[in-house]
Amino acid sequence: MSKYHPLSEAEAIEIASSIQEVFPTGEPLVSREIGDGNLNLVFHIMQPATGRSVIVKQALPYAKVVGESWPLSLDRARIEAEALLKQGELAPGLVPAVYKTDAELALTVMEDLSDHVIMRRGLIEGGTYPAFAEHLSDFLANTLFFTSDLGMNQQDKKKTLAGFINPDLCKITEDLIFDDPYRDADTNSIEDHIRDAAEAIWRDETLHLEVALLREKFLTHAQALLHGDLHTGSIFVTPESTKVIDPEFAYFGPMGFDIGAPIANLLLHFASQEHWSADEAARRDRRAYLLETIRELWTGFDRKFRKLWDEKGVDRVARAKGYQDDYMRRLLQDTVGFAGAKALRRVYGLAHVADIDTITDAAARERAQRLALAIARNLILRHRQAESIEDVIRIAEAAANGQ
Amino acid sequence: MSKYHPLSEAEAIEIASSIQEVFPTGEPLVSREIGDGNLNLVFHIMQPATGRSVIVKQALPYAKVVGESWPLSLDRARIEAEALLKQGELAPGLVPAVYKTDAELALTVMEDLSDHVIMRRGLIEGGTYPAFAEHLSDFLANTLFFTSDLGMNQQDKKKTLAGFINPDLCKITEDLIFDDPYRDADTNSIEDHIRDAAEAIWRDETLHLEVALLREKFLTHAQALLHGDLHTGSIFVTPESTKVIDPEFAYFGPMGFDIGAPIANLLLHFASQEHWSADEAARRDRRAYLLETIRELWTGFDRKFRKLWDEKGVDRVARAKGYQDDYMRRLLQDTVGFAGAKALRRVYGLAHVADIDTITDAAARERAQRLALAIARNLILRHRQAESIEDVIRIAEAAANGQ
């Protein structure tokens, strides 16, 4: 790793200028660093003469969180680049194009998606994304099926898995999602007005058992190559386009973790609708849209995944009668449980979501937080009994109606 | 791998002579090749002047089975050596001492266990091994606990796992245990008199679903570092000593696969007791001994594993109330299912067991085969409902009583 050093803007420009397919002419480039500086440098490199642009993303050897630096392997940049390439191959058009990677410099040069908006921000601004469920269910069905033992040569899968061992980033998930929110951990960030709710969760032994089971799956169930961090902040959208970014948490884990992530974040946004002070009809409409998106996401995934299984399955044994139905039911149950775990920690764990945190009225914010916790807790508690995505929708509706 | 070539006896002697801890003096050594030549060369190297000896085991780059050669990675020798070292560290005295390894030559120089007998042969000759259940439950509890997320740093586990990716040998298991016996495969070796029983299994859709679930666990459940082939032919015994050998199938998989293997082989031996033509009391006594050994093996494992969990557990979340009981129940269920799958394929799959095949009376052999199939099938079918090791014992007793 001797070649590694954080890039200057001039160096980022020099690297970008070598991308002939974007910058075939020699006009000058300009750079703007747009990362948050916590984990990565992100340079937006543009050619003013043509309007063409690329992103140069470089990993930093630490993470700045909780006010201090954690060392973090640069190998995650290699993992991110390889995951992006694999996803681009399996789900064409649904991830940014990759122009260049450099494992030693821990960087990737990729398509600039400035014409898209980060989905979380788009939702907060009231956007609707009619193509999203169709696109994301495509992404999930294709990336998960073709990296699982159902859709991939099973010996090749084992060798591929060895290239996606990702201890540092898995550790972040293991701690921040499956451990810290369930105890009085320093990493938690709890608003005073919901401290009682956090304390109730720390005492909730029934909940802790379900979380231990989910954590065990995250630790041991090498089902498929996951994105690993598929919340609405990792998805760029327009009404017509969806692009999944930032797979630096990629590893072979339980599929439900990836499917549950967008559902969790749609439910957090559902909870955040408490911000409407007067217009009850608008809130109802918005919530109906969000629940319908969740329904379409799962049912689209379920339909597409089964079709791939029937048409592209590599495994004779997987055609055993009843196996596919059993598998899909377990997958739904995992999805429900992981959605709950991913939602819960966003209320008072280390990393919150802007959907809720940007509600300026404290009483409305507290209602949103309590609603999010109620939904998350019920998803976790009931995940092993889930039989249909309607169970998720009923849990959300019941909690919103104060039941 | 340019250095690799199959060793001559002279070369094996030269390598052995460098083991100072066994051969400190200079007297000459003699070699005898004792392998079956199918997978490995095995040289027994002795110093006649002192009576001291070692084993030099070298992997061959192919497997001779079904009359032809399969290419087989030499990397399995590195995996075997690393697994032996790891097991020796976690379960001292229960594996042969390793004196030298050479990954390029795919060889290991290890303790000679000629004063022991292979347990399968010992059982066939009527031996009893009163220390076996105690020793093997020690081996299982320690090797499985300390390579799982319960007993090992979870990030170190991920890195260790990358060194035990074992596609070639896993493929053998995936095909010969979880696929071929359930269809009319060329690899099966079926005596005419039980062809009807094999055909019934090929039509048994309920059984196929359970096998698909077990195979999925074998493919995806990276729970702990397994031996991977822990039948009674991989265990050297005396009445006072137990040594587990040949972990070339080692990989991170479901613990129940390792615990189920010796149980399957004890049950195959149980079935083989049909060879007694007259002495019904002797048969009953022998069977009672075998079932008691199975009971002690599981209960010893269960007790020791829980004790390690309570005293040496590394994971806060794993102390959630009810989690350990839930985990151990699932572990028993896996054990029962894998025991069934490991037993079934030994009746008419590619590799049989001498316990049954050496019964010269065809009618008695057929009774043993049908009994083994009945036990195996019931273990597979009922594994997800198992609550106690007594369920296994009841299945064996009922089948032996023709129920």
Image (spheres, coloured by chain):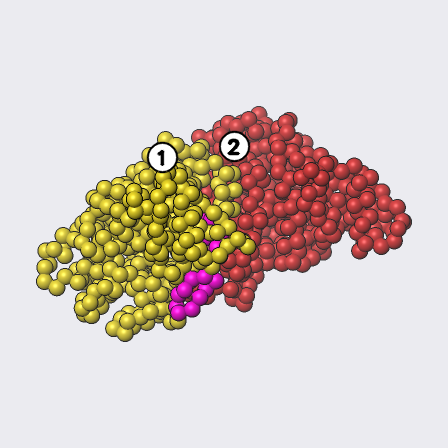
Chain colours: A yellow, B red
**Is residue B127 visible to the viewer in this orientation of the structure?**
no
| A233 w.r.t. B123: above or below | below
Residue B284's spot in the image, x, y percent?
A: 62, 46
Please tell me if label 2 and label 1 are on a single chain: no
Nearer to the camera, B199 or A4: A4
Spatial CA distance of label 2 from label 1 is 24 Å
Given residues A105 and B64, the one toward you in this image is A105
Quadrant of the rendered image containing residue B4: top right
Q: Which mark is residue A264?
A: none
The residue that mark 2 highlights is: B180
Residue at left offset 39%, top offset 32%: A312
Please state the horizontal and vertical placement of residue B32, each as a whole percent of the image: 80, 39
- Residue A67 in magenta? yes
Residue A103 visible to an observer of this rendering:
yes
Q: Is residue B384 left or right of residue A293?
A: right
Question: Which dot, 2 or 1, sits closer to the camera?
Answer: 1
If the image is split into quadrants, where does the N terminus of chain B sit?
Answer: top right
Classify B355 as above or below A339: above
Tell me which residue sits at (60%, 44%) in the image.
B249
| Closer-to-camera residue (B23/B38) | B23
Residue ID for mark 1: A308
Left or right: B130, with B334 as reference point: right
Question: Label 2 marks which chain's residue?
Answer: B
Stretch of the chain drawn in magenta: A62-80
Above or below for A237 versus B36: below
Foreground residue among A86 and A146: A86
Q: Amino acid at mark 1?
A: Leu
